[in-house]
Image (spheres, rainbow, N blue to C red):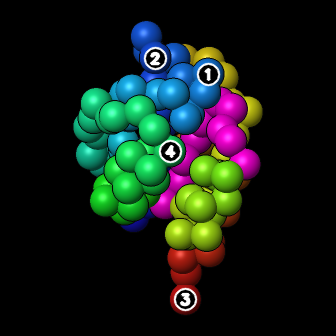
Amino acid sequence: MTTIAVPTWEGRVSPVFDEASALLVVDAEDGRASRRRTYSIQQGCWSHLHTMLDLRVDVLLCGAITQALAGLLEAAGVRVVSQISGPAQAVLDEYLHSAGFAQETAEEAP
């Protein structure tokens, strides 16, 4: 199972992750979302970092993100896919049905 997070703003991918106040989190397996939930998140680099780690996020699909926060997340094992825009659900669906998801599951295989 892979846990994917998408920061949202008015149904779209939030333009700047560091300033996002809502997070769509989806557990996915075999290219399908099995569990979906939305969280309100406090703004701030440390708050975002702790939220992602507490939720055990594997992949972050986001718009812009500061290098510092991206580096901290990647060091903690979160795959950061940035410079993404569009409707959050469409972005999530595209990721689930793309080679991105296939790559994640292949890396998990023994």
Mark 1 is surrounded, within 10 Å at the Cα level, by few (under 14), some (14 to 19) or many (20 or more) other residues, namely many
Checking the image for residue 110, the label placed there is: 3
Which type of secondary structure does the marked residue at label 1 adopt? loop
User: Of discs 4 and 2, which sits in the foreground?
Assistant: 4
Name which residue type carries label 2.
Trp
Q: Which residue is mark 4?
A: 45
Mark 2 is surrounded, within 10 Å at the Cα level, by few (under 14), some (14 to 19) or many (20 or more) other residues, namely some
Based on the displayed image, in which of its 4 quarters is residue 17 positioned?
top right
Residue at image x 45%, y 38%?
44
Disc 3 from disc 4: Cα separation: 34 Å
Residue 105 among magenta residues: no
Which type of secondary structure does the marked residue at label 2 adopt? strand
Residue at image x 43%, y 10%?
10
Based on the displayed image, in which of its 4 quarters is residue 61 positioned?
top right
Mark 3 is surrounded, within 10 Å at the Cα level, by few (under 14), some (14 to 19) or many (20 or more) other residues, namely few
Residue at image x 44%, y 50%?
46
Residue 13 in picture, x, y percent from top left: 55, 24
Disc 4 from disc 2: Cα separation: 17 Å
Magenta-colored segment: predominant secondary structure = loop
